[in-house]
Amino acid sequence: MLLSSSVDEGFVHLINSAPPSLEPILRLKQFLVLDSGGQPELLEMMPVFLRGASKFVYVLKLHESLDKRATIRYFKDGKLVWEYPAYLTNEGTLRLCVRTMRSLNNKNPDIPPTKMMFLATHRDLVAEKQLPGVLDTLHKRLREILLPQFREQLIYCDTKQDDFVFTLNAAKPEKEDRECAESIRECLSKEGQGGREVKVPLRWYALYQKLLEVANERGKKVLPRELCQKVAESMEMDGESCGEALNFFDGLNMLFYFPDILPQLVFMEPQMLLDKVSELVEETYHMRQGKKGQAVPGEKLRFRDHGEVTEKFLGEFESHYEPPLFTPKELVTLLKGLLVFAEMSEDVYFMPCLLQVVAWEVVEEHRVSGRKALALHFPDSSPLMGTFCSTVAYLLSPENSHPCPWRVAQKKEGAPKCLHRNVIKFTVSDYAGAVSLIDHFTHFELHLCTHPKKAAQLWKLAHDAVFAGLKKAGKTIGYTNNTPVPAIVCPAHPRPAKPHPATVDKDRVWTCSIDSEKFGDVDEDSIPWLTLCTSTSAESATSSLSSSSSAVPPTPQPPLSVSTAPASSTTATTTTNIPVSECFIVSSTTASVPSLSLSSPPVSTTTTNTPVSQSVSTSSTTASVSTAPHPVSSSPVIECSSTSSTTATAAIPLSSTASTTPGDVVCRPTLPELLRLEIPEGIATSYTTFGIFLLNDETGDKVNIIEDEHRGNPKRISRSILGEWLRGKGLPVTWETLVKALRDTKLFALADKVQAAKL
């Protein structure tokens, strides 16, 4: 036993005698294998613990269709304990695993994309021709699902890259099965089949081996950080170097070290933590498979149905604890810090991922009309694993710094109104009504039900809290980019079709996220809450909803302005500093956690002659638009109002070449008027000539960019050209200019129509 910090002469001499070189003197291959059994709950939590993965192996049964719901079986000591049907089909489970794989890839973009291997059992059924054509059918379906997106990530059975499903019999292997198993081992260990080569400082590797030796001697899987420090001192390493080494091996999944949550412990065997969490998952299934009518104590009932636990309840699961170092108290501290637990009240903790997924029909009951729903669209992919549950844990935790506490909505008898893995109904203190957060696994939805007078404040509060939770979840799990953008529920596919989001551009045009050919104008009833969720303050948003008593009808709210990069993003940098003479490489990693910055200019009701300043800055990761305050319109405008007994208001778009005098009221084109006159449809066949003239685009570059953005869709291109013009990106914004452009494009009938209506 190592109880003092005396120098280990053998290790130190070996390290000091090694030549100072950046070339490795020893190559090792290490595999960490995790069997999730296809359990969605474990897949949901895997990214919380694991730092990445090099390969995913999907095990299928040849005789089970991808459309079939698999049967999940639990064995104990080789005997079947219980079984239950999975709530997902085999294809659904595959897609869930692919999401997990993509999520782990997101955590470290420096690691090569994860490779995936497909292994199908029960080869004898195919060999004996009991199921003719089943293998070809499986290949065809998998190709439809995975290709071409994952072509480079598949591990193929042959050099022709035709087949990627390995088949064997695991229960009674024959010669052919053993050959297949050997082929699989070669593929998994072959260079270039995923994974990466990591150069480890010799002194650090010696420390890791020594820590393993100490853990084995003590028969422990958890070591106190203080003991690790003494081991490091015996190898002439100070506290800072020891901490850097522990963080380094944590990043490789070789041990678990959480300095910000449990700094006093080092988990030398990562699997033990995963087994501990898996134990809770298995218990929920075991309880749900109990005999009908069997009485369940209150505490266990809340655990089974509501995912609630206490320290006392956790203490009943004795395995994997190592008192006095690692007890239920330390487990609670760790899982709270990782946003796996939410503290509901004193010694009551909530674990969202333990909840059951309910069918779409149940989710539909808790949705309100589409125009009152805020959709959260993830442009790059579906929401990454763990995001929803971690966000829920944040909303319910004391760490939620927003003014009003969030609670799970309760019935009169105290039971939750709606508490499921994919839909949860909350109440927010000081506000009547409820907020429902829904995980569709392709996007999130936020639904609000409250008194109209409170809607403005609650929309803003709910939006800000959810986005703060998403940012915290991404930072905690370690995702590099998982920020959604506000959207609406796509009107192109009304109920009862399963919903999906539609993005909203600066011209207040929605575009279906799954079919870009489907688009249209955003319903004006949706504009107020979209503005609320993108305004700089709840007060300005509230005032935009409240129309004063005026003879003039209220104009629509300003367009949605979204920036995917904040004004100042949070960047966490960890740099490893080691003398070059003692290491193979100096490791430096930077993780940037972007957040969503939402802004919309406040509504101005005063006369102004200040020119609108627009600046656009773009790079590979940021895009920002700065616009001076302007009244509600589809483009930068000045609102002029008279002080006479009869109030008159006109929205005037600004042009780069036109100016106005205070007090002037000029009638100029706006997007709603252009749409009413059907201008986009009229110019769709001649948008190139029209756009070159209207945008003063001698080279045609502006029109080409717009054309590329909208993939050659004439109507979208036409609307975008008009939008650019209204924003002052071309000739003066007047009806005369428009008529001249139409005549020069030989659209005489449309020009006459505009002249008759406006001039």
Image: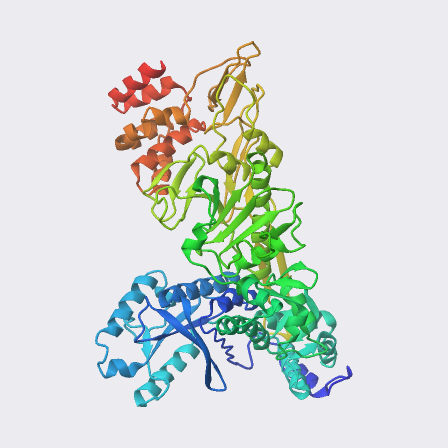
* Image vertical order of residue 720 relative to residue 343, above or below: above
x and y percent of residue 530 in the render? Answer: 50, 38
Q: Residue at x 67, y 54 (%)?
A: 399
Q: Residue at x 51, y 41 (%)?
A: 562
The coloring applied to the image is rainbow
For the question of whether residue 114 can be seen, the reply is yes
Q: Quadrant of the N terminus?
A: bottom right
Residue in front for this viewpoint, 240 or 423: 423
**Closer-to-camera residue (636/353):** 353
Taking 128 as reference, is 645 above or below it?
Answer: above
User: Where 169 falls versus 691 (above or below)?
Assistant: below
Residue 551 in picture, x, y percent from top left: 50, 16
Image spot of residue 471 (x, y percent): 58, 52
In which quarter of the view is residue 441 placed? Answer: bottom left
Examine the image and state in which quarter residue 510 appears.
Answer: top left
Q: Residue furthest top?
A: 644
Q: Taking 398 as reference, is 13 above or below it?
A: below
Q: Is residue 586 visible?
A: no
- The residue nearer to you, when weighing 293 against 285, is 293
Q: Position of residue 398 (x, y in %)?
A: 67, 54
Total numbered badges shown on the rendered structure: 0
Q: In the rendered view of the protein, which quadrant contains the C terminus?
A: top left
Q: In terms of image quadrants, where is residue 394?
A: bottom right
Residue 750 falls left or right of residue 661: left
